[in-house]
Image (cartoon, grey):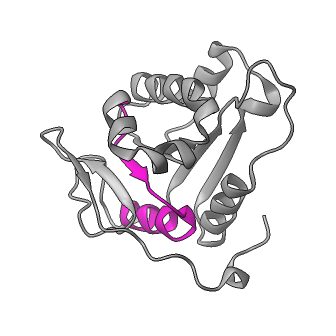
Amino acid sequence: MAKVLIINPVIRAEDDPRHVPYGLALIAAVANREGHEIQVFDANGWRPTDEELIDAIKADDWDVIATGGITTAYGYMKKSVEFARQYAPDALIMMGGGALTAMPRDIMEFCPQVDIGGVGEGVITFPEVLKKIDEGRDRTSDWSDVQGIIWRNMKGDIKLNEERPLLQNIDSLPFP
C-alpha cells in the first residue's frame, strides 16, 4: 500500500491556528480505510520551521506527498512542494483544494514540482490515484484515465482530465 505524507499548510501566518480542515481529514480517513499508510503533518497547527518541514519530508521514503488548501495557503503549499521535489525527488507530488480547483492550469504552471492536481472533490480521486500507485504507476506514468485530475506528462505538458461526478452518498464516507 502507498506510503503518504499529507501536509496541512499554514493557512494564514498572522492568524492563530484553529483546526485541520475537514476535507483534508476526510481524504486521509478514506485513504486510511483503503489500507494506505497515512501521515499528516499539521503545519498550520504546529507552525514549524522550514527545517522541521524538511525533516518531515526526509523522515521516510514516501510514495506520495500531498498538500492543498485555499488561496491564503498558496505560499506555504508552494514552499512545501518545492521542498518535496528537492528532498523526495521520486515521490509523486499531488496538490488539491480550493486554490487548485479554482485555477488548475495556473497553479500547475506556478508549481512545476506538482505531478498531479486533484480538481474538485478528492474523496474518490485521491484513493484512486493511490490505488494506481499500488498498481505500479509513478510520476512519469500516463494518468489520462483518472477523472478529476490535472497532470503533467513526460514532456511537461499539462493535461486536464474529464471532471469527476460529485459524490452522491456522503454517508459512505468514514468519519475522520
Q: Position of residue 85 (x, y in %)?
A: 40, 28
Which residue is found at the position 63% from the left and 15% from the top? 50
Position of residue 13 relative to residue 73, above or below, is above
One can see residue 59 in this view: no
Which residue is found at the position 43% from the left and 31% from the top? 88
Which residue is found at the position 77% from the left and 22% from the top? 47
Q: Position of residue 115 (x, y in %)?
A: 34, 43
Q: Between residues 155 and 100, which one lies in front from this camera angle?
A: 100
- Extreme front residue here? 102
Horizontally, is 21 left or right of 17 in the view?
Answer: left
One can see residue 125 in this view: yes
| Location of the C terminus (image quadrant) | bottom right
Q: Between residues 116 and 72, which one lies in front from this camera angle?
A: 72
Question: Does the magenta portion include 128?
Answer: yes
Specify the quadrant of the image occupied by residue 77.
Answer: top right
Horizontally, is 25 left or right of 19 in the view?
Answer: left
Specify the quadrant of the image occupied by residue 54.
Answer: top right
Q: Position of residue 43 (x, y in %)?
A: 72, 30
Q: Between residues 16 and 71, which one lies in front from this camera angle?
A: 71
* Residue range highlighted in magenta: 111-133
Question: Does the magenta portion include 141?
Answer: no
Horizontally, is 92 left or right of 101 in the view?
Answer: left
- Extreme left residue here? 155
Q: Position of residue 154 (x, y in %)?
A: 16, 43
